[in-house]
Image (tube, coloured by chain):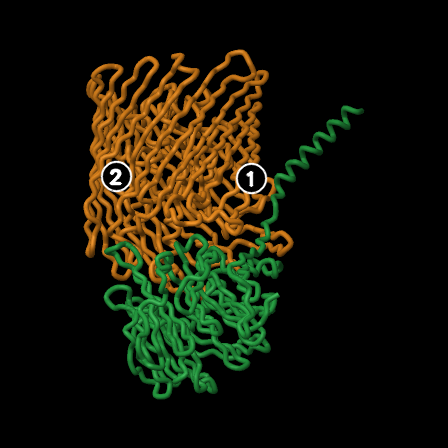
Chain colours: A green, B orange
Amino acid sequence: MHTAIRRGCLAGGMILLLLAGGCRKEIPMIRSEVDYVTLPTSPERIEGFFLVNEGNMGSNKCTIDHFDARTGGYRRNIYPERNPGVVKELGDVGNDIGIHGDRLYVVVNCSNLVEVMDVYTAEHIGSLSIPNCRYIVFDGDRAYVSSYAGPVQIDPEARPGKVVEIDLERLAITREVVVGYQPEEMVITGGRLYVANSGGYRYPNYDRTVSVVDLATFEVVNTIDVAINLHRMELDRFGRIYVSSRGDYYGTGSDIYVIDSKSEQVIGRLGIAASEMCLDDDRLYTISTEWSYTTQSNEITYAVYDTASERILSRSFITDGTDERITLPYGLAVNPETKEIYVCDATNYVTPGYLYCFTPEGRFKWRVRTGDIPAHIAFSEEPFY
Amino acid sequence: MFDRLIRLFVWSAALAGAGVAAPAHAEGRLDSLQHVEEVVVTGRLVRREIIPVQELAGEELHRLGAHNVADALRYFSGVQIKDYGGVGGLKTVNIRSMGTNHVGVFYDGIELGNAQNGTVDLGRFSLDNMEAVTLYNGQKSAVFQPAKDFGSSGSIYLQTRTPHFDEGETHHLRATFRTGSFGVVNPALLWEQRLSERVSGSFSGEYLRSSGRYRFTYRMQEGYDTTAVRRNGDLDAVRVEGGLFGRVEQGYWRAKAYFYHSNRGYPGAVVRNKFSHEDRQWDTNFFTQGAFKKDFRPWYSLLVQGKYAYDYLHYLSDPTLDESTMYTDNRYHQQEIYLTAANRFVPFPWWELSLSADWQYNRLDADLRDFVYPRRQTMLAAAATALRFDRVELQASLLGTWVHDLTRGDEMSDKRKLTPAVFLTWRPFGGEEGFNLRAFYKRIFRMPTLNDLYYTFIGNVHLEPEFTTQYDVGATYARTFRHTWLRRLELQADVYYNEVENKIVATPTSNFFRWTMVNLGQVEIRGLDAAVQTDWLVGRDLTLAARLNYTYQRAQDFTDPSSEFYGGQIPYIPWHSGSAALNAVWWRWELSYSFIYTGERYSSSANIPYNYQLPWYTSDLSLARSWRLGRGGLKTTLEVNNLFDQQYEVVACYPMPGINFKFIVQYEF
């Protein structure tokens, strides 16, 4: 009898053991972690910023970090623990971030969606599916998202992109307009939206235009011929649009072109190569990264252009030699209140990158580890809880 | 736009690196092996290998519940398989963490080339007509072989079945039908015919169709729990091969042709809001090869081999099916011609010398824009020697390689390299069995692939070859018992240190779309491979076999000393991994259980929680029964794989199947 029980227990135990072997641990929740990178401050306007790490394609590793100016704390990867119910977290390849009203928006390119969160908590409010979405801009109660995925043509290589209008109240797509090939960044002025078309899928027949969309009729009313492979856009207080051309990575180099939004004419070019561009007050900060086969390394240059005096102020805004430590600058932002300069270093793309903070004079202040491929920053005037 | 290029690229780049040890062979298997080796290799009856070797052959190979060669290789130590899931998903092998590009795969004695990306998808090679799968660290332990056989850091030999007729037999026929989960329909036929006293032929054909569908679950701690069906992993493939096998005085010749065609979905990564893909791929592979070997004199033998191969790949990404995708419709054509002659001289019974020379021509054509249409000529020459004494055996080889590329654009400068290997074994107590010590050193390289050099945008013609240096010390022990339950015991363990220098890695340039290849990486691998094999006979009718493998690897990335992650474990290499296979045969019944364990890993050399990958371990069970039926035998098998329905990933975002079933009926006479 006893033997039978013992055997039964033994058998039961073994079965349990085997079953336990089958039920592996659940995927561990990734908690955010905070580094205190600088002394606490008492900002008047800018409470902090959110940073999007793109993550490599197919890795679903897009994350957001938050910096709190009041505590000096940099918190990595805030999304999963605040949104445990969202399947597969933030998604695959973040491409842009924006704050409008009390909401935080992240454009997740390969997840084909715009994620909408509460700016105070980063809690999920909703999301909008937009195939191959790229960048976002806001105007009143509307947002505009550029997308590579316009209507498919008879010639599948000649597929234009589009700009999608979103009603922010209802979180619904209201209108769409077909623009040029592979549209990238946008600016809005005078009731018109200007979008830079890259044509990046069409090498070597890059697009070379800016499409002008009238926001009332939501139609393309003008197409401005600029230069090949357009990407970044900034608007100054004089109504001039700065648009960067990536060049073709071979003979034609990168440059920044200036469009007068009133005449919708190209009025000049700056002679500055730019892969990153950021405007603060009258200063246009740029970073250029160009691969040199001769040295088998990236050649990196930093510049500042004064949009009021229309001249180059500096060929290097990092003044203390810290730029030597930056492997691959990938994102650029300037704090509108403190004028501190932030440079994202994507390093080798497959390990976490770094965010560097410089004083307005270009001296190194602090550095912090980010997620993979840190790239886009949105400053927040709201506290984050 | 370059997303796709990068993706294809990362796929090819992703395929690289692992190592080994499995012991000598069970007596029961020797019959088939002897027979195989008689034709192909050295014909030694007892394999006191000087080089670490692991082999799965004959029935043992077919009892594993493996669908393909990649599945079978999981039972070797020192090997990491990257498996993107499903019947049609890419499966590549990495030996001792040196990288997929350092693995030479030989099919019936001649290397399967892929000059384009340097890797072979082992998931495509069926086990249906496979006689043996053998893995060597360093190189095959024979000096009498083509120069190319000296040219990889690790080699896998796939040996298909060779006809063998007993007295009075004129033909063999084997018909197999497999079906089960994933909508698998897999009929196969093998026919062997004796054509004359000295010549026989074989034909093998197979069709495989699978929907590739399976359920998978992601269950996050304190969070979401979602189940979905894997889509677009369907596969439709046909394989046909035929061979002629002839004997001549003191030698043999053989010729074969192989054809494979497949149409498959590319399942893609499972990411937020995108759980399925629509991309498709079509492949056609054809090769024909021949070999002739003859011992002209007691002291001189000649081996001549030749091959022609044609590989076609068509990749389609269609925005009318998936509106988020970039239109891609590319066709790649590869051709290869290979010729080799190897000469063996045996001046004394204890001294063997070999000289071999190979010539190879590769060309790659593609409808990519600005493609440079690379052609590559490779000349290889090898000198090797073996010294065999009573208790000591020494092998040494020197390989010279010369590579010349020709393109319509910039091209790589010519490369000339000389690389050595030395192998030593010592039997301190003599005898065929018992204790055996061994050691080896090998330095070898892999050429930059044609993709590395010439892929539009990404390629970099300034690349140098990527070198590996291996040091290995190991021991084996084998013993046969006559009167105990335990009939045979084999043990094998090796410790090793490997270096990979000038590792070719993709590095980002001005933006995310622009990557290029550079000689940047530096990896050091310290590892231990251990294996035990036992054979038992209980009573008169119950035979048992058990095989255990264990691997420890510390594979560290020492590329950038200024990096915070300097010295991190390289992606997807677990510190601990292992497998167990148990097999019982009683009368006409066979029961097999196998277990695979892969310990914790990281998906990046930044070994932080964010990149952590959970360990996974699966159990497979199979039960078979055979019957006599007329002149032949009928065998039915039921397999249950991933018995405990573990939800796991080998590669992040590529979920693997849970519990699945297979039913096999085979008739043979």
For badge 2, the amino acid type reads Lys
Q: How far apart are marks 1 and 2 (CA)?
A: 39 Å
Tell me which chain the residue with mark 1 is part of. B
The residue labelled by disc 1 is B618
In this view, the residue in front, B72 or A297, is A297
The image shows residue B71 at horizontal and vertical percentages of: 47, 39
Among the 4 quarters of the image, the one containing residue B437:
top left
Left or right side of B224 for B166 = left
Q: In this view, does B268 lie above or below B57?
A: below
Residue that numbered label 2 is attached to: B307
Q: What residue type is labelled 1?
A: Thr
Query: Considering the numbered disc 2 on the image, is that residue within a helix, a strand or a loop?
Result: strand
SS for callout 1: strand
Mark 1 or 2: in front is 1
Q: Give above or below for B647 relative to B350.
A: below
Q: Which chain carries label 2?
A: B
Which residue is farthest right? A1
- The residue under the point 55% across, 42% down is B616
Using the image as rendered, state which of residue A123 and residue B289 is in the foreground. Answer: A123
Q: Position of residue B166 (x, y in %)?
A: 39, 21
Q: Residues within 10 Å of mark 2 (few under 14, many from 20)?
A: many
Q: Could you tell me if residue A153 is visible in this image?
A: no
Q: Give how far across and how far down residue B104 sits, in percent.
A: 33, 38
Q: Which mark is residue B3?
A: none
Residue B182 in percent (x, y) is at 53, 48
In this orientation, does residue B528 appear? yes
Q: Which of B653 and A371 is in front in this view?
A: A371
